[in-house]
Image: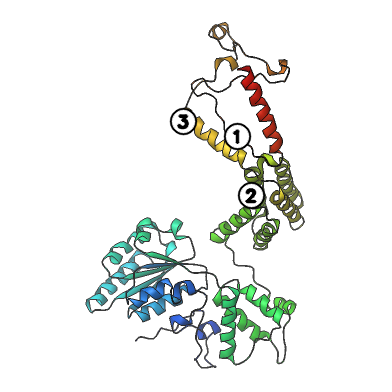
Amino acid sequence: MRKPEPQPTLFAAAGLAHDAPHPLPDRLRPRELSDVVGQDHILGPDGALTRMLETRTLGSLIFWGPPGTGKTTVARLLADATALHFEQISAVFSGVADLKKVFEAARARRETGTGTLLFVDEVHRFNRAQQDSFLPVMEDGTVVLVGATTENPSFELNAALLSRARVLVFHSLDAAAVEKLFARAEQIEGRALPLDAEARAVLVRMADGDGRAALTLAEEVWRSARPGETFTAQELQTILQRRAPIYDKSADGHYNLISALHKSVRGSDPDAALYYLARMLDAGEDPLFLARRIVRMAIEDVGLADPQALVIANAAKDAYDFLGSPEGELALAQAVIYVATAPKSNAAYVAFGAAMRTAKEAGSLLPPKHILNAPTKLMKSEGYGGGYQYDHDTPEGFSGQDYFPDELGRQTFYDPPERGFEREIRKRLDYWAKLRGERR
């Protein structure tokens, strides 16, 4: 069976020479699928790929996950496990001409009885037409396509391509998986990482779920340590100049974290909300983007249950605009705490949506004539303004007249809950409904 070609990948079983002149991630690359860590949901005993390999057949796949989670490694090992020729291209450096050459070589190889596993790194970077070019060779079995992407395939890949491939999600490595990599690295190196317990935990967090980064950081630690030296957490961060958290503001990380922040606020969990706010600020997110989102949360999820929420969210936005970073970030934190701890109601949000749907369905229905102004004699003779009652002239300041178009009839959109300030609004609406019924 063909051995995998040397390639800078991330995890591995032990067994290579200690003095191999390769970076640590290369020396610890897996030689078998069972050596890959952190992806048990697809490579464990009941994993999707494990079941697929038991049949010795492989369909086209899309690997979706963050960098450093083993996508390239697994693709290479899959080719080895299924006796397929491994061919790798990158969408960053390849065009139509390159694809044609790869497809022609795969057809020729197929004539000799050898199949091809075509691994396409960053497949989402191919345009729609280029993605379509894979369809014929996937359908006739010329290649088994394995595409890797860090972007959400639902948004970045053609529906036709997705319908012919199974999407497998690769997870960021958790702390236990990163620790397993460090243990393997220590076995290969024949020495422990020169870190105290707290520093080791910090190094795990620095890796941010990226196995390749974890091993690169470990290698940097060994390079930096003098004989007999053990780093504390503070010393480790000084030596490594702690890299920024992996966070692409234009990609899924951005949307995932803002979603987590919004749902934590909606769920009235100020601690979780502060955590996600801090993560996004630490990663370099635009604070004014966060301020706008907090305003939106105050409108959508608090609404009139606490009218002050919108006031405070707007004030935080203005305070940040005035103070800048880092002082203004505290105003955003205070707004997040206030909105998260405010009583929740989406009644206004729901009411507006219902009103918009009704307005679109009703079209151009005229309001009832009694609430229309009559600036001319002709309009007055047509009934415009006739019978209108000025609410302030009534004892309760409420006339109880109907204001919807006659053809539409009275509608109810806003249904405030018995929470926060909307409890008072509910009392008013019930009182006016009672008066309206009496006057009818």
- Name the foreground residue: 8 vs 337: 337
Q: Is residue 323 left or right of residue 54?
A: right
Q: Position of residue 151 (x, y in %)?
A: 49, 62
Q: Tell me if label 2 and label 1 are in contact, CB under 8 Å.
A: no
Residue identifier under label 1: 414
Q: Nearer the viewer, mark 2 or mark 1?
A: 1
Residue identifier under label 2: 293
- Name the foreground residue: 37 vs 411: 411
Quadrant housing the N terminus: bottom left
- Name the foreground residue: 131 vs 14: 14
Tell me the amino acid under the disc marked 3.
Answer: Glu
Among numbered discs 2 and 3, the one appearing first in the sequence = 2
Residue at x 63% of width, y 51% of height: 266
The residues tagged by marks 3 and 1 sit, at their Cα atoms, a distance apart of 18 Å
Tell me the amino acid under the disc marked 2.
Answer: Arg
Residue identifier under label 3: 361
211 lies above or below 19: above
Residue 324 appears anywhere in the view: no
